[in-house]
Image (spheres, helix red, strand yellow):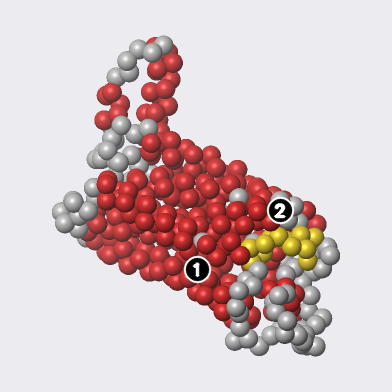
Amino acid sequence: MYSISSMYFFSMDEEVNYTSYENYTAYVVDPKTLSCEIPLPSPTAALTLSVLLIAIFLLAIPGNLLVGWVIRTSRQALTPSDVYLFHLTIADGLMALTIPFWAVALIKGWVFGDIMCKLLSLVNEANFYTSILFLACISVDRYLVIVHARESLQSRQRKCSRLLCAAVWALGWALALPALFNDAFELNSERMICHETFDIGKAASWRNATRGFRHILGFLLPLLVMVICYGVTIARLLRTRGFQKHRAMKVITAVVIAFLLCWTPYHITLIVDTLLRADAIPFDCALRRSVNVALVVTNSLALLHSCINPVLYAFVGEKFRSKMTQLVQRRARKERTSGSKFSRSTSQTSEGNGAIL
């Protein structure tokens, strides 16, 4: 994911000069863009955005920890959706752990060194991919459960779902390897930033390739899978009767809307930024500045999704609230009885199998 700390004030010409610092070919600055410099954010804007990021961090960490705790302590066999959701909480939690560093960088600049720049960028980018891919896995499993329940009995075994989780983690970290090109360096003798510095071959080609993967595998493909699976699922639910239908439709609709609201603005802005850098859009100084500011805002909105997921997949569901209540009661009774055996009757109140979904 794009480094928040550098979006505000990283101009196009400065980046070209830096990413080609080992290229002995002279670079001539276009006089039309010479005066287009992206200024540092105002202290008020930087502080406001930092507070927003810290708020997201404080919501995401306990929310994902609570969901993970409920899933792992369940006495019932986990469904594939529960397994995917557990791994999703890990991905969102790891992404949220990097947020305080970017919040500090907005105010003080990047003060954590080159190694931390690479490491945090790698973690952030990897979990950017894995969290979205796990969302797609959940949508496929919901489709199989509701639309093809009988045909999917063998495919829903826990062993297969865990193998798929391993594949998602491997793919996510593989796609995140270009984040190792991120470096900490000084910009305009004002402050340090953590930013991508492709210095192998043509910087523009590397950037376009990595962003192509990000748009396709990190947004368009998972979105297509979610729309198709949830669209067919809703169509099937509309032909059923009962309260369960309306509750399922409400959760499914909320999932798709939240995904679109959080990620679509960021990807649209990033596409515009890529087209500007590739000269596919005529260069305009005002547009360049607007895109840089929009990247900061939309990136923060995308990070908000890490704390929304626990609400959408867990807190909205009655099954999660019931399971959490059982766990709290179980722990309280264990404390009161000082180690006496706790009746297992409460663990059987949830409908069906699985911990949450």
Q: Which residue is mark 1?
A: 214
Question: Which amino acid, by three-letter code, is at mark 1?
Answer: Arg
Tell me, yes or no, whether the two marked residues, 1 and 2, touch with CB atoms within 8 Å. Answer: no
**In the visual, does 268 lie left or right of 289?**
left
Q: Secondary structure at mark 1?
A: helix
The answer, for residue 132, to whether it is visible in the render is no
Tag of residue 172: none
Q: Is residue 280 above or below residue 114?
A: below
Furthest residue in direction left, as rendered? 150
**In the visual, does 145 lie left or right of 202?**
left
Q: What percent of the width, then of the height, locates residue 235?
A: 27, 64
> In this orientation, which residue lies closer to the viewer: 191 or 235?
191
Q: What percent of the width, then of the height, locates residue 66?
A: 47, 37
Q: Secondary structure at mark 2?
A: helix
Give the mark nearer the N terminus: 1 vs 2.
2
> In this orientation, which residue lies closer to the viewer: 299 or 209?
209
Residue at x 59%, y 61% (from the top left corner): 180
The answer, for residue 25, to whether it is visible in the render is yes
Question: Which amino acid, by three-letter code, is at mark 2?
Answer: Gly
Q: What percent of the width, then of the height, locates residue 331?
A: 42, 22
> In this orientation, which residue lies closer to the viewer: 19 or 154?
19
Q: How many marks?
A: 2
Residue at x 62%, y 76% (from the top left corner): 203
Q: Determine the image quadrant of residue 27.
A: bottom right
Q: Is residue 145 above or below residue 10?
A: above
Q: What percent of the width, then of the height, locates residue 52?
A: 66, 52
Disc 2 crowd, CA 10 A, few/some/many (<14, 14-19, 20+): some
Residue at x 32%, y 18% (from the top left corner): 342
Q: Which residue is mark 2?
A: 113
User: How far apart are the two marked residues, 1 and 2, measured between alpha carbons?
Assistant: 26 Å
**In the visual, does 32 lie left or right of 233?**
right
